Image: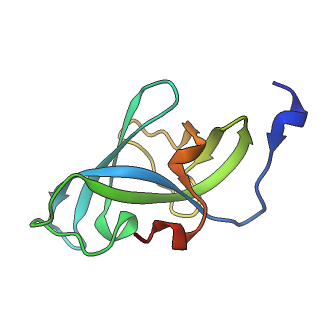
Amino acid sequence: MNNNDLTYPQEDVIEYLSVDIIEYSNDHFPGHVTCKFIDIYGKIHHIYEKAPVVASNLNENSVFPQKGYIAGEIIFNTKGIIKFSTKKPWDIETKENQNVFYVHENQIINELADKKE
């Protein structure tokens, strides 16, 4: 990889990784959901997280799957491949304790306004 091909994000800019919320896993306040996404290698990652962190207005009666978003930051972007970390701002990890992933550029939402449908 050539360093001229890399772009680096601005400091303290939050991006969002688009995920599929596949189930409402636990109703203990504030409620928890299981999310999944697929990285550039085809590996499926699962994240168990508080429902309000990934989407609004979810409960045990919600219909799944539906879209959700995990906050994080782009470490670098090269030719449409993003190295993305979910360490900041909320230290979110997969069930395998992973928080850095290589994903496709179209899996990243750059602004909160982009999440509205």
**In the figure, residue 54 lies in which quadrant?**
bottom left
Residue farthest to the left, as pictured: 61
Q: Is residue 90 above or below residue 106?
A: below
Between 63 and 46, the residue placed more toward the observer is 63
Relative placement, left or right, of 25 versus 72 is left
Total labels drawn: 0
Residue at (59% x, 48% y) in the render: 85
Residue at (55% x, 46% y) in the render: 106
Colour scheme of this structure image? Answer: rainbow
Report x, y in % for residue 94: 40, 43
Relative placement, left or right, of 4 versus 27 is right
Relative placement, left or right, of 3 versus 82 is right
Report x, y in % for residue 52: 33, 71
Residue at (29% x, 65% y) in the render: 51
Residue farthest to the right, as pictured: 4
Report x, y in % for residue 34: 27, 50
Quadrant placement of the N terminus: top right
Quadrant placement of the C terminus: bottom left
Between 112 and 54, the residue placed more toward the observer is 112
Report x, y in % for residue 77: 72, 42
**In the figure, residue 109 lies in which quadrant?**
bottom right
Q: Is residue 17 above or below residue 105?
A: below
Q: Is residue 26 above or below residue 41?
A: below
Residue at (32% x, 73% y) in the render: 56
